[in-house]
Image: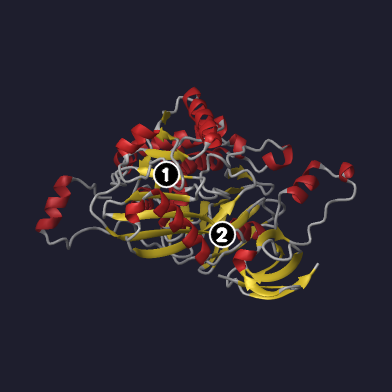
Amino acid sequence: MLLIKCPWCGERAETEFSYGGEAGIKRPLEPDKLTDEEWADYLFNRSNPKGAHHELWNHAGGCRRWFEAERDTVTYRIAVTREL
Amino acid sequence: MKKYSALSLVRNALGHNRHWQPAWRKPAPKQEYDVVVVGGGGHGLATAYYLAKEHGIRNVAVLEKGWVGGGNTGRNTTIVRSNYLWTEASLLYEKSMQLWEGLSQELNYNVMFSQRGVYNLGHNLQDMRDIERRVSANRLNGIDAEVVGPAEISKAIPLLDTSASARYPVLGASLQRRAGVARHDAVAWGFARAADALGVDIIEQCEVTGIRRNGGRVVGVETTRGNVVANKVAVVVAGHASVLAEMAGMRLPIESHPLQAFVSEPLKPALDTVVMSGAVHGYISQSDKGELVIGAGIDAYNGYGQRGSFQTIEHTMEAIVALFPSFSRVRMLRQWGGIVDVCPDACPIISKTPVDGLYFNCGWGTGGFKATPGSGWAFAHTIARDQPHELNAPFSLQRFVSGALIDEHGAAAVAH
């Protein structure tokens, strides 16, 4: 089980957290101006890297706040967590 | 290829089994192929086999970074069924089911396909409504399916706790009698041997490190054993589709997750069918060796580590022990993880790509094994004709742009 450091609560067991997927995906400000391909890319496509992954977690069983983490998707080691 | 038969068994036994041929050759990669299939799992080998057999394309290489069937083909729980909800998915999986039914004869290799039936349990009113709907949809598509009640389930699966006081009460189940299990390794080996006999080069220990393109068209691959020129490149790399897509400058609607399975110590025959419960994230069958084969749900986070988390093991075992209280003292022998490529609609991609001559078959999520022959069959058609078969046309990459998704989260049975 992963030990995840919530930026507010400190290190807690993985089971207290829920996963939020890739971080840094911004909803387009003017969706009407996008092509279908651009909208599909925002909606569905993900970088899904093998290695360092920039992602979101939620401390669902604790302070219920979202934060960012840099985690390696092969070793599962979390390099850093930070406030959003 | 020497044909396997009862006679060949006897003859080789008399020769102290010293004269068996290797099931496939170990060729070095040639400079150039008509089609390079990336990925030597069941799907890739089936693709190569049907390319050679159905379309006469025999100048084909299958490049495998490890060994044949060492990825998800050898890591699943071997369940085969075709009871999906939507017509598009049902027809694709049913095509596969029909191929399974003749596969051992077709390949001259015993894939130990055993149609012992699959029960999908319903534990509450909504489960039962979904089961009724799915069974009706299956029957409209000509796929065998029935709804069975607790009395019949209890008779067929005596060890399952169907009592009123059960932690997860069993209100009923869907049953597909033609569904069952197959020997996963044998499927890879059988396709490898049959493809090899038709002239396909199966090249193990050969990792693809780049996809070479020239003006929007694929021209070959870079590998750890040198560059290979190819007219067409077909990528079937469950777990690593996004990694290969990046080599071709593409992004996919896929996230890779660890999925775990377990086998127990061997027991005497105790369970002669397959029991699945989507609601509690557990599915179980008993192998011919007597081991209980148990599958879990996926881990929530993206991962390529081929291992999963402890809480998922605990969660699955809780469910299995609640369903089958008499298994509580059975010891687990092995545990492992595979990496599943999950699409937003829990359906695969078997598709052309924006790069000419480059094809992708991926995104099978937790349910790729059952589709092995049908997936290869449809993918081979797509590659040979440069257009999809009507069975896999709905499973194009384009569906994520058009919005015509095929939502199979319910019938996928494993929570994504």
SS class, disc 1 = loop
Indicate which label's residue lies in the foreground, 1 or 2.
1
Q: Quadrant of residue B157?
A: top left
Density class for disc 1 (Cα within 10 Å; few <14, some 14-19, many ≥20) is few
Percent from the top left, x then y, of residue B59?
A: 46, 50
Q: Quadrant of the C terminus of chain A?
A: bottom right
Percent from the top left, x then y, of residue B278?
A: 50, 45
Q: On residue B294, which mark appears?
A: none
Percent from the top left, x then y, of residue B8?
A: 16, 49
Q: Quadrant of residue B169?
A: top left
**In the shown orientation, is residue B202 left or right of residue B360?**
left
Residue type at numbered disc 1: Ser
- Viewer-side residue, B47 vs B345: B345
Name the residue that disc number 2 marks: B299
- Viewer-side residue, B359 vs B357: B359
x 52%, y 57%: residue: B32
Density class for disc 2 (Cα within 10 Å; few <14, some 14-19, many ≥20) is many
Up the image or down, A50 lies above or below B318; here it is below
Q: On residue B165, which mark appears?
A: 1
Up the image or down, B284 lies above or below B28; here it is above
Earlier residue among tags 1 and 2: 1
Instruction: State the residue lying farthest toward the front.
Output: B165
Q: CA distance from mark 1 to mark 2?
A: 30 Å
Residue type at numbered disc 2: Asp
- Viewer-side residue, B232 vs B325: B325
Up the image or down, B8 lies above or below B150; here it is below
Instruction: State the residue lying farthest toward the left.
Output: B14
Please state the total of marks drawn on the protein image.
Answer: 2
Q: Quadrant of the N terminus of chain A?
A: bottom right
Chain letter of the residue beneath label 2 in the structure image: B
